[in-house]
Image (spheres, grey):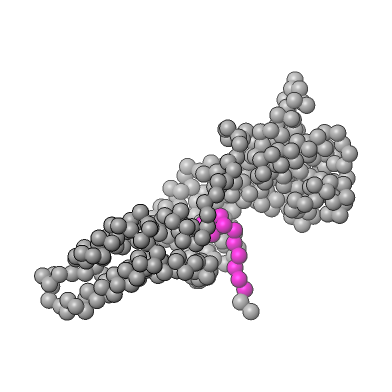
Amino acid sequence: MENRIVISDEAESVLKEIVDNEKVSDYWKNRFENLSNRDDTILRGCFKELRESGLIHVQWGDNYPYQIQILKDSYLYEEKKEQERRLGMSQFEKELHDLLKRTESIQPPANAAAGDFDLHKYNQPSEDWINDFEIFYNKYLKEHALGSRIKTILFHRNLGAYRQLVSCLKSISKDQEFIDKMNGIEKTTVPVYQANMLPEYDVFLSHANKDKADLVDELNDSLEKLGVKIFYDKKSLEWGDKWKDRILDGTKKAEFAIIVISENFFDREWTEKELNEFLNRQNRNGQKLILPIVHNITNEDLRKKYPSVADIQAIDSKAYSCDEIALLFARQLIKRLKAQN
């Protein structure tokens, strides 16, 4: 049975970047030069993931990957992803994709003065393509904004028609609203995150004090190594702060909340107050906020104590190292940032 390689979306994006820039000298040197600590760590994590997945060999020097060997499985991975994309396409998208793909191997038509060769044979591929394009137009494109222009080009069919139609088709391939319409997807309004500014913290660490020594201190250190902005009471509270006000303020200014739930967490005034603050925020915004970690308890214990949290996917502290949890969080943060952009 074939072993299927599975990598994160971020690593997949980096793999594509590696393949696309395989021949570009100093690309990765320049790429790493101006990264923030967090972005640098995340990018290195992607390289590590690709290497451990058997997709690349990489040698580091002067703090950047100066030699990258793209292995066979990388190219096979890209081919398989393309096949998967095609399987997920509608009939409209498949025909659109096929027409565009064919243009990669078709020469634009030439006139009789272009050279001493069989002109009919030379121009036949582009003629066939235009004929197929006309069928595609009649099936799908009459209502598109470019429809009238395409109709005129097809009617006159001059020497420049092929290039003009290819240009139109490329524009249509980028018109996601039209593609969605062809796929029967209605446009919906997606609720926008209600914060008026970037959150002050990437994550709030909610926990019981008794869990600091055996988990939370180390988790904080792992997150800090990735450049994550953390509200951690041990480090965020300063001398003279009104700690209750600062903690409540922190719950409002964090993008996510990692909540370490243990027996020590149960029935503590402030841990449960923080939990309620985050539950209320999540319910108001309808956006993922709470990232629970069960620590030395079972999911059944969690369900009995906090039924509303038990419905949220949690991870077990026994199953992951703190560094692994930090990387899992970094991926959540990247997805959020991409969605907001």
Name the residue located 86 percent from the left edge and 54 percent from the top edge: 300
- Is residue 234 shown left or right of residue 230? right
- 210 within the magenta span: no
Name the residue located 57 percent from the left edge and 33 percent from the top edge: 197
- Is residue 71 shown left or right of residue 234? left
Q: Is residue 106 above or below residue 277?
A: below
Q: Is residue 173 above or below residue 216?
A: below
Question: x, y percentage for residue 235?
Answer: 72, 32
Q: Is residue 245 above or below residue 41?
A: above
- 10 within the magenta span: yes
205 or 335: nearer the viewer: 335
Q: Is residue 18 visible?
A: no
Question: x, y percentage for residue 42?
Answer: 58, 49
Q: Is residue 249 above or below residue 291?
A: above
Question: x, y percentage for residue 81?
Answer: 52, 67
Q: Which residues are magenta?
A: 3-13
Name the residue located 47 percent from the left edge and 44 percent from the top edge: 33
The quadrant in which residue 124 appears is bottom left
The quadrant in which residue 275 appears is top right
299 or 109: nearer the viewer: 109
